[in-house]
Amino acid sequence: MISPETIALVRERTDIVAIITEAVPSLKRRGRSWVGLCPFHKEKTPSFHVSPDRGFFHCFGCQESGSAFDFLRKHEGYTFPEAVRALAERAGIAVEETSDQAVVAEADRQRKARDELYAVNALAATYFEEQLRNSEHKSYALGELGRRELLPGSSAKVDEVLQSFRVGYAPPGWDGLQNFLRAQGASPVAAETVGLLVPRSSGSGYYDRFRHRLMFAVVDAQGRVVAFSGRVLPDLPNAPRDGESKPPKYINSPESPIYTKGQMLFGIYQARHAIRKEERAVLVEGNFDVLSLHARGTGNVVAPLGTAFTVEQAKLLKRFASEVIFLFDGDAAGRKAVMLSRETVRAAGISARVAVLPDGVDPDELARTKGGKRGKRDEGETIDQGSHGGKAISDLLASAKGMFESLVEMALDVSFTQADALERHARIEYVKKLLAEEDDPVLCAMGKSFTDMMAGRLDIVRSGEGAFRALERSVKQALTAKQAKHAAQRRLSHGQQPTRGADPALGTASRIASRPPGSAERQAMVGILIEWPALLDDADVAEELSLLEGPGVTLVAALRRAYQSAEKALDIEAFLSSLPPLMKGFAARRLADPATENEAQAKGYLLDNANKLKKLLLSQETALLARENYRAQNWEIERGLLQQAADKLRAKHGL
């Protein structure tokens, strides 16, 4: 809905270096580019380049690239319209929209309504935070935090975490929040929409949904409060309870136009940078697990919000890292949750590992362990908790196993011997199904070692059982079939995968020796044109473009289509999107890290390479004519060939 003119103006006025420097403080000027440590993957040597001339960034390590809009989308989790609006506001540009006026008006109305919902949630978060400091009943909330060793004022790190997660307290009154929102001029209808207020069943008016609960703000990837999660606290003296049943441990905000629980993760905003830095996310079950691990130095931790781990949540994580480690509670429910998550991670295309906690222990408890405790993990096996706190967590994460191996171990754990025949058969069938669905070529390459592992695992529980023999045969058959499948796939793709080397778009490193003569010169010419597309209109340069061939011709044609001669501007997004992957990588590298300082220098460099290419081509033609002369039987033909060879030699030397 945002007009192309607005997008172009925002792109023109945005200082991409200023935007990226806020997230990449290591960025330093180097020639025409700025270079720093990539924010998208861990590295020790800077390979992240930013070109202010082009408004473009590219990492030579992980291949992430794009405009300032793309940076906000990939680093901060913005959508494209959100990124445009954020940069427009920063540059003081009014956002204009274009479309049917009725559609524009409706979109504007919906946006303002959503902004009102974000605003009322932000006010509520402020109210809950203030009540944690000043309410007469705050001791109940502080007691729960103290029990978790997260008491305000206990350490600077704890205070930082409590403030980051906007932890607060909902007092026991029925209208405390309602009165506060009214005093701030907030709409009660908006508060009802996001679930802060509930309409009274009799009469008019509202009452507070959250009462006498420890409050956690749910913040989206852009830092906006979208919902709340309230944890139950011990009853107040002589306080009436709603009904006779025990109150739920957590009450979460209902879904609203700005909150869908299956698409949101608790802690994603606070953890996003740590997830990128560590290149993995840690998934736990509860809010306190998240806070406790953050307070003890493990900052890449998030949790679902009272739901099973969904594909949408997995895809949200994948925007920040390609791997997730499950750190669920060490009980039957935690193991079941991991088993149910296998299809989720497969559907989302994110790799997964599992860290196994001792039975009956949750991450929060382990993080607070003071050492010396040993928890039972399996029969005859114990987990040493001599390391404690953050060290215990980091050790556990380091020992995380692949999801497939973990699921097999869960299915064939010590309880396998205690199961009846039907359940044992069901578990064996489950393992066979896991193997049949597994596509990991590394696992398939394990071959006999995997079969031996399975045999050993089952031999412990029931040596010689017929079901075990059947499973062993099934494992061998499945592995053999999968090895054949992956071998066929490797043969099919042989020679087509890119290898490391300079500019694979115009020849891979492994084939440099067999590249046609002149490839380096053509590659240099194309690279210069990418850096300075205005040279396409230069008459001297135009004469030399006939020397290009193959991929170079394709790339220059795409460059010409994306270059607007009248405006002297290159539409980088259109240019890159029209290229095959290998050519796109080559072009992105030249855009982010130009080899020349100015257009005059670039033109001279291009013409020098064109002259080298001409001489090379003339040498080839001369050699070819000499061979033809050797084979010639007719004197007239031989004389003609000699004359042509002489002409080629004179041309080569400029005579």
Image (cartoon, rainbow, N blue to C red):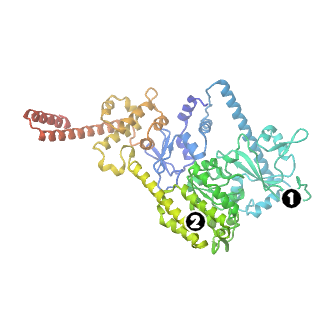
Question: Which residue is tagged 1?
Answer: 235
Q: Nearer the viewer, residue 155 or 305?
A: 305
Q: Earlier in the sequence, mark 1 or mark 2?
A: 1
Which amino acid, by three-letter code, is at mark 2? Ser
Total marks in image: 2
Q: Residue at x 47, y 52 (%)?
A: 46
| Residue 631 vertical placement versus 467 (above, below) | above
Q: Is residue 443 visible?
A: no
Which amino acid, by three-letter code, is at mark 1? Asp
Q: Is residue 518 left or right of residue 147?
A: left
Question: Which residue is tagged 2?
Answer: 399
Task: Locate the C terminus by quadrant.
Answer: top left
Quick one: label 2, few (<14), some, or many (20+) residues within 10 Å? few
Image spot of residue 386 (x, y percent):
64, 73
What distance separates the C-alpha of mark 1 from that of mark 2? 41 Å
Q: Residue at x 61, y 66 (%)?
A: 412
Q: Nearer the viewer, mark 1 or mark 2?
A: 2
